[in-house]
């Protein structure tokens, strides 16, 4: 088996981890910056600083994304929420009203989206074939009989070509295939089914994340002292073992950890603070919930590292959008509403122009290098592991959590598809509307998480300063 990680890399990463651990340990229990002690300097395995991401996202990206994701093309997502869990018996659904998803009535979905128009090429259409036939008739009779070829293609053959293309595209996918039966799918308006805290907790969600981390994330190839406890000890510090992994396996863990952190940030930032009167519920930032999920004391030191991994995941998706710019710029974004479609195309071009200005994109070319056979095997293993993660989303017991879990894993899977489609197939790479919607909405979730971190930090500092003022008044 090819060894991807050089010893010196492991030593450097181990030293970096020790330094970071000392930094967390040296913070006083009352330090308001404890949750954020990792959020400065270099993003792991990237040539970019966290401060640069904060500035670029909060000032340049998030305002543009907010406006774009409210458009019809991006807010309607087609999904099957009834697909059974493929890994274990159904352990029941969340009974809370907040877990429910409100599907869209048929009449509320724009006609262009219902028709699933992908603006295919007219190369083999009947109209084009008729035009070609008329052109041929203009040539001389003898030339037509002696040299002309019948270049028409039947509808049956055209369908076969499209099937072959879909099969080839599926080989590049990092997520499980969509349902073939349209009747099992339903449209959901994401703007009226926002990702937020639903009360879904306990054994079921723990089982989901344990399956993802312990059964699908990679583990060190070499024996590491104490690593045998990883599978059985839920408190083991995963970050301690990243130094024993190659870049690709570290990247997989950081992608999942960053996605998990983003979800947890949203659940803390969109928390039901007050039931209110007459159904006027108050949702907002719950600082205590955030601390419970990320403070070093409640996460055995892992919380700040998990927050840092958010920035890795963000940079991977940002790079994928930049790389897919030629495809995304040529997309029609057809919803059937002419003026809106034109505005969306303009907004996409403006966003892509902004993305292009970011100076320190993630370098995907550093991954899956070396011996071509071993690199291919690792790529397929990477792809299989991520497909399993996408399948696990069908085991989530809360419908709203399942909706956003499926969307965000598909968005991240689409980003990986863009980054790691071989150069020989890149010119024929196609993205379905479903993938584009998931890609941008998933990026929107990551973007919002980065912004929420800034808000939580300000709230915790204000809370701490208020406590200090009270203490100074009495002592």
Image (cartoon, rainbow, N blue to C red):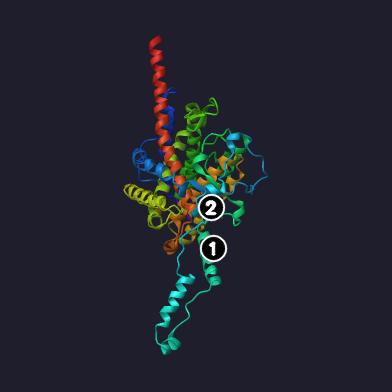
Determine the residue located farthest toward the right in the rendered image. Answer: 89
On-image quarter of the C terminus? top left
From this viewpoint, is residue 279 visible?
A: yes
Left/right of residue 92 with respect to residue 133 in the rendered view: right
The part of the image, by quadrant, that contains residue 203 is top right
- Do we see residue 22 in this rendering? no
Q: Which label number is shown at residue 451?
A: none
Residue at the limit of the structure toward the bottom, as seen here = 142
Q: Position of residue 161 (x, y in %)?
A: 52, 68
Residue designated by label 1: 167
Q: Is residue 253 above or below residue 155?
A: above
* Marker disc for residue 175: 2
Classify residue 23 as left or right of residue 391: left
Q: Residue at x 41, y 21 (%)?
A: 464
Q: CA distance from mark 1 to mark 2?
A: 14 Å
Depth check, front residue: 31 or 172: 172
In the image, what residue occupies the spot 44% across and 46% down?
71
Crowdedness near tag 1: few (<14), some (14–19) or many (≥20) residues, C-alpha within 10 Å: few
Q: 125 and 230: which one is in front?
A: 125
Residue 304 x/y as whole percent: 45, 34
Say whether disc 1 or disc 2 marks the residue closer to the N-terminus.
Answer: 1
Residue in the picture at 46% in, 71% down: 127
Q: x%, y% of residue 131?
A: 43, 75
Q: Could you say whether the residue bearing mark 1 is in a helix, strand or loop?
A: helix
In the displayed structure image, the side of residue 397 where residue 466 appears, left or right: left
Q: Residues within 10 Å of mark 2 (few under 14, many from 20)?
A: many
Q: Secondary structure at mark 2?
A: loop
Residue that protrudes farthest toward the front in the picture: 107
């Amino acid at each position: 088996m090819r060894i991807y990680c050089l010893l010196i890399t492991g030593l450097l990463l181990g030293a970096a981890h020790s330094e970071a651990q000392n930094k967390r340990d040296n913070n006083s229990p009352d330090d308001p910056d404890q949750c954020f002690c990792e959020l400065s300097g270099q993003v792991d395995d990237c040539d970019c600083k966290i401060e640069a991401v904060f500035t670029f996202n909060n000032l340049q990206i998030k305002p543009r994304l907010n406006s774009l994701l409210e458009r019809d093309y991006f807010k309607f997502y087609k999904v099957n929420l009834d697909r059974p869990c493929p890994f274990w018996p159904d352990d029941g659904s969340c009974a809370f009203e907040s877990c429910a998803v409100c599907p869209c009535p048929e009449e509320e979905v724009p006609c262009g989206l219902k028709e699933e128009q992908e603006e295919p090429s007219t190369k083999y259409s009947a109209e084009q074939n008729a035009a070609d036939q008329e052109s041929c008739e203009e040539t001389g009779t003898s030339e037509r009989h002696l040299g002309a070829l019948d270049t028409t293609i039947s509808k049956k053959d055209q369908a076969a070509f499209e099937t072959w293309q879909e099969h080839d595209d599926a080989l590049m996918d990092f997520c499980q295939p969509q349902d073939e039966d349209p009747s099992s799918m339903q449209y959901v308006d994401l703007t009226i089914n926002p990702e937020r805290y639903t009360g879904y907790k306990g054994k079921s969600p723990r089982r989901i994340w344990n399956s993802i981390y312990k059964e699908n994330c990679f583990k060190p190839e070499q024996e590491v002292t104490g690593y045998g406890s990883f599978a059985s000890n839920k408190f083991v510090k995963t970050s301690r073992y990243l130094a024993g992994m190659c870049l690709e396996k570290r990247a997989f863990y950081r992608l999942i950890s960053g996605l998990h952190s983003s979800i947890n940030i949203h659940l803390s930032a969109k928390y039901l603070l007050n039931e209110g009167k007459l159904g006027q519920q108050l949702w907002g930032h719950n600082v205590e919930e955030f601390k419970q999920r990320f403070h070093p004391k409640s996460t055995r030191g892992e919380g700040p590292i998990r927050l840092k991994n958010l920035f890795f995941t963000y940079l991977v998706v940002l790079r994928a959008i930049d790389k897919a710019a030629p495809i995304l710029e040529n997309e029609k974004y057809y919803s059937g509403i002419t003026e809106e479609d034109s505005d969306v195309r303009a907004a996409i071009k403006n966003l892509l122009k902004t993305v292009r200005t970011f100076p320190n994109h993630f370098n995907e070319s550093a991954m899956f290098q070396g011996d071509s056979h071993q690199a291919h095997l690792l790529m397929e293993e990477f792809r299989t592991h991520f497909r399993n993660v996408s399948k696990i989303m069908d085991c989530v017991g809360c419908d709203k959590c399942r909706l956003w879990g499926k969307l965000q894993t598909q968005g991240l899977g689409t980003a990986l598809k863009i980054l790691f489609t071989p150069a020989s197939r890149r010119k024929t790479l196609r993205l379905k509307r479903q993938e584009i919607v998931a890609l941008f909405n998933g990026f929107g979730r990551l973007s919002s998480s980065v912004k929420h971190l800034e808000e939580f930090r300000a709230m915790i500092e204000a809370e701490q300063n208020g406590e200090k003022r009270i203490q100074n008044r009495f002592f």
